[in-house]
Image (cartoon, helix red, strand yellow):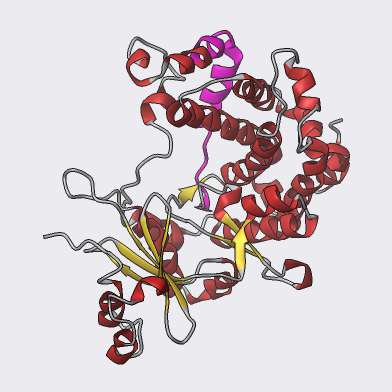
Amino acid sequence: MKFVLNSQNVYDYLVENGLCDSLQEAEQYPSQTSQSNIERITAKNFNLLVTLPDGRKLLVKQEQYNSQGKTAGELFGEWRIQKLLQTFPQLEHWRVFLPELLLYDAEKSIMVSTYLDSYRDLSDFYSKENNFSTKVAAEIGSYLAIVHRDTWNQESYREFFSSEVVRVKPQVSPLLVQSLDRIGPEIFAITPMDGLKFFALYQRYDSLGQAIAQLRETLSPSCLTHNDLKLNNILVAQEWENSNGNMVRLIDWERSSWGDPAFDLGTAIGSYLQMWLGSLVISNSLSIEESLKLATTPLELLQPSIAALALAYFDTFPEIVEYRPDFLRRVVQFAGWGLMTGILSMVQYQKTFNNTGIAMLQVAKALLCRPDSSMSTIFGVAIEEVFRSQNSEFSTLS
C-alpha cells in the first residue's frame, strides 16, 4: 500500500529518517495539537512546511500519485544535483546558490529540504517591489555561468547524468509542441477553440516554423543545464541590499540534464520579457504597438537587468565565446522560444489566446527570425557593453 504523507504522520516520518533529534521532539506536538506547526503550501506536489521546536523549518514534498499509483519521478531530478555534489567534492562551492536538500526517499517519492524563509520568490519580489536591481540580476548570471563553466565538456559529469533517466512530466503538452512542426486534425482534439486562433496565426509565418526547427536541430548538449530557469525558480534574499554575495538561490532542478547552455540563459531572459509582455494594457481601441508602449512594466525598466545578467555570465565564463562564436545569437533565439512555450502554456492551461498572446507571438517571431537586429530590443542602451564582452563578430553589429 502506498504511503501518503499528511499532517498526522509527517512528524513520525521525520523522526524515522533522522531529521528530528529524538522521539521526544515529535512528542511535544501530538497530532491533535500540531496543526499550527504544519502549513500546507499550494503546489503541484503535496507540500508541508513543518516548524520544529528548535525553530528549524523543513519543507516536505511528496509527488502526487497518478491513477496507476506511479509518480513522474521529478523529485529525483532535483535530488540528483545533491548527489552530484556528494559524488564530486570539487563542486562543493555550488552549495551557496542551490537549495538545501536533506533527504530523498525514492520508494515514497518524498523529498525534505531546509525551508529558506530568509529568501523570497524573485517573480513575487519583482511584481510587488517593482525593483529591478542589476546587482541581483548579475548574481544570477554569474551563478548560471559557474554551473556551465565547471561542467563544460567534462566526460565524468556527462556520464553521471546519463547513468539514470528521470521520468519527467513535460511542462507543456508534447502534442502541442509537436504541433508546431506539423499542424494536423489532431490539434482540434487537444486545443480549446480560442487556442486555435494561435495556430491559425502561427501558420501564416513560414519563417517562424523554420527558425524553430533549425534551433532544435542545432541543439548542442555540452554541460549541466537547469532547463527551467524562470523567475519563479529563483529566490532572492530578503536582505539582499545588505548582502555582499549569496543573494540568490537557483531552485527546482527537477528538469536538469546535460544540455545546451544557450537554452538556460535564453530562458532566463525570456522570463524577464514575459514580465513586460504580461503587463500590457490590452484594449480593443489600442493597437499591439500602442499596448507594448503602455506596459505597466516597461521594457526600458527591465533592460538594465537583462544586460547585467548577460554581462555577468560572459565575465564569469568568457571562454563560451571561443567555444560557441554564435552563442549570443542563440541566446536571443532561445528567449524567443521561451515566449513560444509561454503562449503554448497559456493555450493549454488558461484556454485562451488574446491580444497579450498576439503581442508575445510578434516579439517571439522577431527574436527567433531576426536575432541580430533584435538584440537592441533585449539589451537596450547596454548593447555595446554586451557586444564588447563577445568576440569581434558580435562587436561589429549595430
Q: Nearer the viewer, residue 265 or 104?
A: 104
Q: Nearer the viewer, residue 355 or 389?
A: 355
* Residue at the extreme front of the image, as rendered: 33
Is residue 325 at all visible to an observer of this figure? no
Q: What's the residue at 40%, 19% (across, down)? A: 191
Q: What's the residue at 46%, 50% (across, down)? A: 258
In the rendered image, the vertical position of residue 348 relative to residue 101, given as above or below: above
Q: How many marks?
A: 0
Q: What's the residue at 35%, 46% (across, down)? A: 168
Q: Is residue 220 magenta?
A: yes
- Is most of the magenta stretch helix, strand or loop? helix
Residue range in magenta is: 199-224
- Residue 33's spot in the image, x, y percent? 33, 77
- Residue 382's spot in the image, x, y percent? 86, 43
Q: Is residue 171 magenta?
A: no
Say which quadrant the C terminus sits in.
top right
- Residue 107's spot in the image, x, y percent? 21, 64
Left or right, 136 with reference to 27: right
Q: What's the residue at 44%, 63% (across, down)? A: 81
In the rendered image, the vertical position of residue 180 relative to residue 386, given as above or below: above
- Residue 20's spot in the image, x, y percent? 35, 84
Q: Quadrant of residue 368?
A: top right
Say which quadrant the N terminus sits in.
bottom left
In the rendered image, the vertical position of residue 257 relative to residue 95, given as above or below: above
Q: Nearer the viewer, residue 371 or 25?
A: 25
Q: Quadrant of residue 236?
A: bottom right
Is residue 253 at all visible to an observer of this figure? yes
